[in-house]
Image: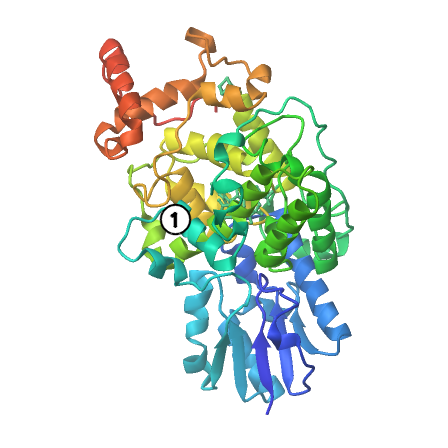
């Protein structure tokens, strides 16, 4: 009896039990489908990265003796959805059973749920064996209690014995955030980026031939992202050796001199499952145990929290809140996305830099995403649907389960404070404190009049536009009082309908 097993483009987990034994009665199906290339307009590097990694994964399976059916984006079958494709292949191969791994996206979960009915064949569903927790674990952990990442994270540390002693957390505290707020001024030197380049012009030719919409610089002849597990492992080693020691200190820093500073740049390899979260966390902890003088505990804890804490947590939020999460809009924001989000063409140096970098590299680090583009989108009242589509398209690591809670929840607070304990709203003073963008800007956070920083204006405008909604966040009460006093001095205001400096 032949079985077809579907492997999605973000399920490139070579350690999955499926691949432990070679079986002649199993055919693995990988497919570059038009629907996946079009559900949002993707950055060119995102299309290239996924397709190249899928092709490399299929080649590795074949070399290991597994049977594979691969659909390229230029094949006729690429026009099908997953269900019709599997139905067709089941007929072609005379297959009598189907199997797939749990998708991480709601959209694909719904689509594949109809597989048995559509084909009339028995279908088995397997775990991806990637995450620490199940889809439902975070929801069960909180139940009706208030969801706060920190409590979940501490439980995960204790449950998996990560950075734990017999009497509590290593270093006597769970969180070293207060040590992790330094501005970077050039010492240590910025890391080399990228560390390796690939020639993917053959994959790019197929994407162009298939007519997939795209934007951003493809860098097909000098591709900067890993597309095999071996390359992903090399990137992990590179991060541990050169950047992890400084990860904590400069975690919130921003610089025109370096697109990634001391961040890991591992999210694409993690989200496609070329790397497992456990191996990344373990590698960081081992580095610290072997050489605590080089690897400060604050750096290791800060890094572990991103993966063991935030990554698992946002996945839990996604599965607890879908499908309604895609329509949350607490601030009733509706302004259109300014054109400069697609070009970087704006006088605001912070946005110009973060967006241009994203178009060039399909990458921005967390603080650029949250406190530059995200902060602007929040303050300017941009429509969350448009903002979501932009984030989902532009970053190489963007898959809805992780993009949506970060964008709607963390950056836009469109869920009314479910993910973030308060809106991450900041004026120009914050941007100046954490980076060097203001140096190149025609505006100035301390100036008034023509040179006044648009972000600062938007910040106070935002506080005054939503006094009732913002009152639910006690940490904002002093700011609201200040905003009210400023408002009395300057008169009534309305929501901006046009982005400044477009
Ligand atoms: C508005 C917005 C949108 C985002 N969209 C995505 C997205 O589509 N895909 C994505 O993987 N991350 C997203 N993030 C989270 C985070 O910005 C990226 O994971 C990170 O920038 C990836 O770069 P890095 O590998 O250098 O991460 P590092 O800063 O070095 O962190 C290490 C790892 O921790 C994990 N991580 C860190 N922060 C988060 C977080 N908030 N949520 C989940 N995992 C986290 C990632 O796997 C990351 O690779 C978003 C954040 C914001 C504010
Ligand atoms: S002055 Fe304002 S707009 Fe210009 S870079 Fe600084 S924060 Fe951004």
**Nearer-the-camera pick, 485 or 147:** 147
Does 166 appear above or below 195?
Answer: below
For disc 1, the neighbor class at 10 Å (few under 14, some 14 to 19, many from 20) is few
**Nearer-the-camera pick, 128 or 379:** 128
Does 369 appear above or below 105?
Answer: above
- Residue 111 image point, x, y percent: 44, 69
**Nearer-the-camera pick, 307 or 488:** 307
- Residue 301 appears left or right of 138: right
- Residue 180 image point, x, y percent: 54, 32
Does 118 appear above or below 329?
Answer: below
| Residue receiving disc 1 | 151
User: Residue sitting at 52 percent across and 19 percent down?
Assistant: 432
Please state, as top left, top right, bottom left or bottom right, where the N terminus lies in the image: bottom right
Instruction: Determine the secondary structure under disc 1.
Output: helix
- Residue 300 image point, x, y percent: 59, 43
Any part of residue 75 in sight: yes
User: Residue sitting at 41 percent across and 48 percent down?
Assistant: 405
Does 75 appear above or below 480?
Answer: below
User: Residue sitting at 65 percent across and 45 percent down?
Assistant: 288
- Residue 179 image point, x, y percent: 53, 31
Residue situated furthest bottom in the rendering: 1
């Amino acid at each position: 009896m032949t079985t077809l097993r579907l492997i999605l483009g973000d399920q490139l987990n070579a350690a999955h039990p499926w691949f432990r034994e070679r079986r002649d009665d199993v055919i693995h199906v990988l497919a570059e489908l038009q629907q996946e290339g079009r559900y949002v307009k993707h950055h060119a590097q995102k299309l290239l990265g996924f397709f190249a990694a899928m092709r490399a994964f299929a080649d590795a399976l074949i070399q290991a003796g597994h049977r594979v059916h691969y659909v390229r984006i230029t094949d006729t079958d690429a026009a099908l959805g997953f269900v019709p494709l599997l139905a067709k292949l089941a007929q072609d191969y005379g297959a009598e059973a189907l199997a797939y791994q749990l998708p991480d996206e709601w959209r694909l979960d719904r689509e594949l749920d109809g597989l048995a009915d559509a084909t009339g064949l028995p279908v088995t569903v397997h775990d991806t064996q990637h995450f620490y927790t199940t889809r439902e674990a975070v929801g069960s952990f909180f139940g009706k209690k208030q969801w706060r990442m920190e409590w979940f994270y501490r439980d995960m540390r204790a449950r998996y014995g990560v950075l734990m002693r017999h009497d509590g957390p290593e270093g006597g505290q769970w969180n070293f955030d207060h040590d992790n707020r330094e501005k970077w001024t050039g010492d240590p030197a910025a890391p080399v980026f990228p560390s390796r380049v690939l020639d993917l012009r053959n994959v790019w030719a197929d994407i162009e031939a298939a007519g997939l919409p795209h934007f951003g610089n493809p860098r097909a002849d000098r591709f900067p992202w890993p597309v095999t597990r071996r390359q992903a492992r090399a990137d992990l080693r590179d991060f541990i050796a050169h950047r992890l020691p400084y990860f904590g200190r400069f975690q919130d820093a921003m610089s025109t001199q370096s697109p990634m500073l001391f961040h890991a740049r591992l999210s694409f390899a993690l989200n496609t499952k070329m790397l497992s979260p456990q191996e990344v966390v373990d590698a960081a902890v081992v580095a610290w145990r072997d050489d605590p003088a080089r690897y400060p505990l604050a750096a290791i804890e800060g890094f572990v929290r991103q993966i063991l804490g935030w990554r698992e947590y946002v996945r839990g939020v996604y599965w607890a809140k879908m499908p309604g999460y895609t329509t949350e809009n607490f601030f009733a924001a509706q302004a259109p996305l300014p054109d400069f989000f697609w070009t970087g063409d704006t006088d605001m140096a912070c946005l110009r830099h973060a967006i241009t970098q994203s178009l060039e590299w399909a990458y921005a680090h967390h603080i650029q995403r949250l406190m530059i583009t995200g902060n602007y989108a929040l303050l300017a009242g941009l429509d969350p649907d448009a903002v979501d589509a932009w984030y989902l398209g532009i970053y190489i690591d963007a898959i809805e389960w992780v993009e949506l809670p970060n964008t709607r929840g963390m950056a836009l607070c469109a869920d009314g404070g479910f993910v973030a304990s308060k809106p991450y709203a900041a004026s120009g003073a914050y941007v100046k404190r954490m980076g060097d963008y203001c140096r190149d800007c025609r505006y100035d956070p301390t100036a008034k009049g023509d040179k006044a920083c648009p972000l600062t204006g938007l910040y106070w405008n935002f506080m005054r536009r939503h006094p009732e909604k913002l009152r639910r966040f006690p940490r904002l009460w002093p700011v609201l009082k200040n905003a009210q006093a400023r408002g009395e001095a300057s008169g009534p205001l309305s929501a901006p309908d046009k982005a400044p400096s477009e």
